[in-house]
Image: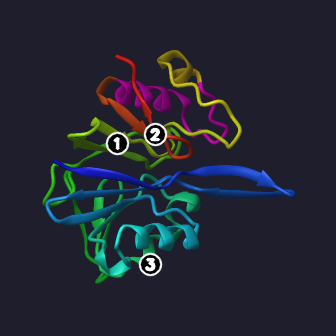
């Protein structure tokens, strides 16, 4: 089974008239592979958190981007040996593009299309011994710093997303995730348990 570790808890805040944001960055380890979900855009925090895990950029095999907003994807290129996955394809540094068929190669990790926040958006389903089924949801769920993170199902469904591209699709994606997840890792905010 896979193990997950939150390397960076995502944030979205305003300070001195400037906006600061970087996504939650998650490390998954399965079958000897190191996988990063959403490397974000805070280079210093990313490198420090990798070092704490005894890793450096060449040690990462795959990077999964839940979507292409730069606060989630800007640092994808620092992983020189990794293949990059999005909602449908695997991208290699030689220009090769191939379908992943909904799974990270060599693992049981699933990539699920979860549209709505962005036109091309996916979430990552990871089976773990410690937490059960964990869905790394990208920005299907996310909060600004200081905003109350209500995690009951009704509040999760009603939570406003000022950047939503298609509200109907987002609601369907939220329903899908809430049906399968034991825990959710949001795009910005704390990992939380789903009450069944």
Categorize mark 3 by other alpha carbons within 10 Å: few (<14), some (14-19), many (20+). Answer: some
Q: CA distance from mark 1 to mark 2?
A: 20 Å
Closer to the camera in the image, 4 or 162: 4
**Mark 2, secondary structure of its residue:** loop
Q: Is residue 169 magenta?
A: yes
Of the residues under marks 1 and 3, which one precedes in the sequence? Answer: 3
Image position of 45 (left or right of 194): right
Of the residues under marks 3 and 2, which one precedes in the sequence? Answer: 3
Q: Label 1 belongs to which residue?
A: 113
Q: CA distance from mark 1 to mark 3?
A: 25 Å
1 or 2: mark nearer the eye: 2
Magenta highlight range:
159-178
- The secondary structure making up most of the magenta span is helix
At 59% from the left edge and 38% from the top edge, which residue is drawn? 164
Q: Compared with residue 21, is residue 96 higher up or lower down, i.e. above or below? A: below
At 38% from the left edge and 25% from the top edge, which residue is drawn? 178
Q: Label 3 belongs to which residue?
A: 78
Residue 191 tag number: 2
Q: Position of residue 12 (x, y in %)?
A: 66, 50
**Mark 3, secondary structure of its residue:** helix
Of the residues under marks 1 and 2, which one precedes in the sequence? Answer: 1
At 21% from the left edge and 56% from the top edge, which residue is drawn? 104
Q: Compared with residue 40, is residue 112 higher up or lower down, i.e. above or below? A: above
Categorize mark 2 by other alpha carbons within 10 Å: few (<14), some (14-19), many (20+). Answer: some
Q: Position of residue 174 (x, y in %)?
A: 44, 29
**Mark 1, secondary structure of its residue:** strand
Image position of 63 (left or right of 71): left
3 or 2: mark nearer the eye: 2
Image position of 16 (left or right of 95): right
Residue 196 tag number: none
Q: CA distance from mark 3 to mark 2?
A: 25 Å
């Amino acid at each position: 089974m896979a193990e997950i570790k939150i390397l960076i808890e995502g944030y979205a805040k305003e300070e001195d008239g400037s906006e600061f944001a970087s996504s939650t960055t998650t490390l998954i380890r399965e079958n000897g592979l190191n996988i990063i979900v959403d490397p974000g855009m805070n280079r210093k925090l990313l490198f420090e958190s990798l070092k704490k895990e005894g890793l450096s950029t060449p040690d990462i095999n795959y990077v999964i981007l839940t979507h292409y907003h730069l606060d989630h994807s800007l640092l994808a290129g620092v992983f020189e040996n990794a293949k990059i996955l999005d909602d449908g394809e695997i991208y290699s540094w030689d220009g090769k593009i191939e379908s992943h068929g909904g799974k990270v190669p060599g693992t049981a990790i699933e990539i699920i299309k979860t549209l709505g926040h962005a036109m091309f958006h996916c979430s990552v389903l990871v089976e773990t011994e410690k937490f059960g089924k964990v869905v790394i949801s990208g920005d299907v769920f996310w909060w600004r710093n200081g905003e109350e993170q209500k995690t009951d199902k009704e509040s999760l469904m009603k939570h406003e997303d000022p950047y939503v591209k298609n509200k109907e699709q987002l609601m369907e994606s939220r329903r899908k995730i809430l049906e399968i997840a034991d825990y959710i890792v949001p795009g910005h905010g704390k990992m939380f348990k789903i009450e069944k």
